[in-house]
Image: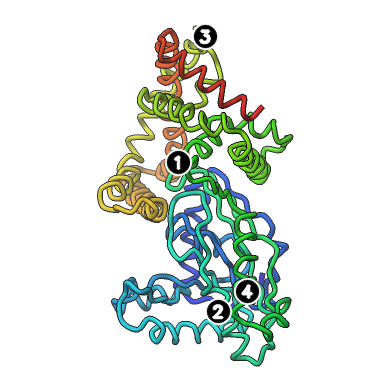
Amino acid sequence: MIGRFKNWTGTYIYGYLFVKIGINTFYKRYEAVGQENVPYHNKPILFAINHQNAFLDPILTSVVGKQNTYYLTRADIFKKPFLNKLFRGIYMLPIYRKRDGGNTIEKNEGTFNECYDLLKENNIIIIFPEGNHNNKKNLRPIMKGLVRIAYGADNKYNNELDIKIVPVGLNYSEYSGFQSEFLINFGEPISINDYKQQKEENESKAVNTITEAISKGMSKEMIDIQKLDYYEAIHEMLFLFPNQIKIAAGEKEKSLIAKFRSQKQFISKIENTIETNASVAENLNEKAKSVISYTKENGLKYWLFDKEKYSFLNLFFAVLGLVLGLPFHLYGVLNNYIPYKIPVWFVNSKIKDITFHGSFKMAFGVLFFKLFWLLQTITVALLTDDYIWILYLLSLPLSAIFSWNYWKYFLKTRGKFRYNGLSKTDAFKTVKADRAYLLSLIN
């Protein structure tokens, strides 16, 4: 762990702790798989990462890793001196794009030279070779800049750097949902030394070859739906039939990596079926759209369709649980609604780009909850005797968790009543038939 804290700035330490708290509260669970593939501390490393969730992508990678990382990010956010100092304090480096104006090659020369020197010191640099972010589970074309940075560093230091390019796949169950899940996969490293002879013969060809290897490596470590004409149908089937997909893949573990493997297998099979079966290709989008639109329009959830109908006893005990838990839920709402609502309101009303929603929700959530809990506890301490404030402080996170789960339980119960009410209609029966068709593709 000594290397983990090497050369940390005060800003980076604070940022690390802040994000670490955020990860363990914002996400229900997360897994980091394949870190044994990463030659931490003794090799210069470039992480090639898919970019789907704005600021969360680099900071989550940095926090779950075993060594501090640097990462390239858009230069326009560095314009103000204070922000420039702040971002550089957490190891962000500016990269200029054509839209920023001016001679980008000349402007980026300083950043690239900084990258070369960092690699010489066996540091890790995060690069998003897709060149932009997009909240679709699809790998976009890879740009050659990453390999050119690797070769630039190697050329500067007499071809003595054994630079490793590690493909990394970030996989979110939801991009901005509280208590969602994320999996980060570290793939097998690509060594630029393996392409030395090809580089000597034709460097441009070597760049293309390594770029293709990076693309294949990244695709392997992420959910990558390539059939974009069928994207919504394939993507939603992952949520329509999560258990059935795992069973079909023979996965028995409850881990996120097991879920990932089963989804990869399903996507490969369904995309192959689309290519080879004209009937499936013709019907898939139509059937999927029927199920998706009906579910959303009627405020239902996919898991409700796993049963034909919910029994009287099931609904009775669900309502009983809601009645018994109501006082505790109200206590939780009273103490936690404001710090929960402010970040949600701000993000939904002020942040137009949805790919930034998860980043801001996690950051503001950690900040506002801790701030309000502190102020509330101080107020109780001033108004009460003895050590009641300690019990009150302990009750705050517990009541927040209870209220969140109570509200989800309420929505589930309401969904069951609504589902039962719709189950006798002709439209419902049509959707059930369409769903059965989609399920048959898995089985």
> Could you tell me how far apart the alpha carbons at marks 2 and 3 are, in whole angstroms?
63 Å
Q: Residue 374, position in %: x, y?
A: 37, 52
Q: Is residue 355 above or below residue 287?
A: below
Residue named by callout 4: 45
Q: Quadrant of the N terminus?
A: bottom right
In the rendered structure, which amino acid carries the disc numbered 2? Answer: Arg
Using a 10 Å C-alpha cutoff, classify the residue at mark 3 as few (fewer than 14 neighbours), some (14 to 19) or many (20 or more).
few
Q: Give how far apart the Cα atoms at labels 3 and 1 are.
A: 40 Å
- Of pointers 1 and 4, the one earlier in the residue sequence: 4
Tag 1–tag 4 contact (CB < 8 Å): no
Residue denoted by label 2: 148
* Cα distance in 3D space between marks 1 and 2: 58 Å
Q: Residue at x 68, y 84 (%)?
A: 201
Look at label 1 and name its amino acid. Leu
Question: What residue is drawn where x is 48% and y is 17%?
Answer: 318
Quadrant showing the C terminus: top right
Left or right position of 136 against 194: left
Frontmost of labels 1 and 4 is 4
* In this rendering, the label closer to the viewer, 3 or 4: 4
**Residue neighbourhood size for the residue with mark 4, other residues' Cα within 10 Å, grouped as few (<14), some (14–19), many (≥20):** many
Camera-nearest residue between 279 and 75:
279
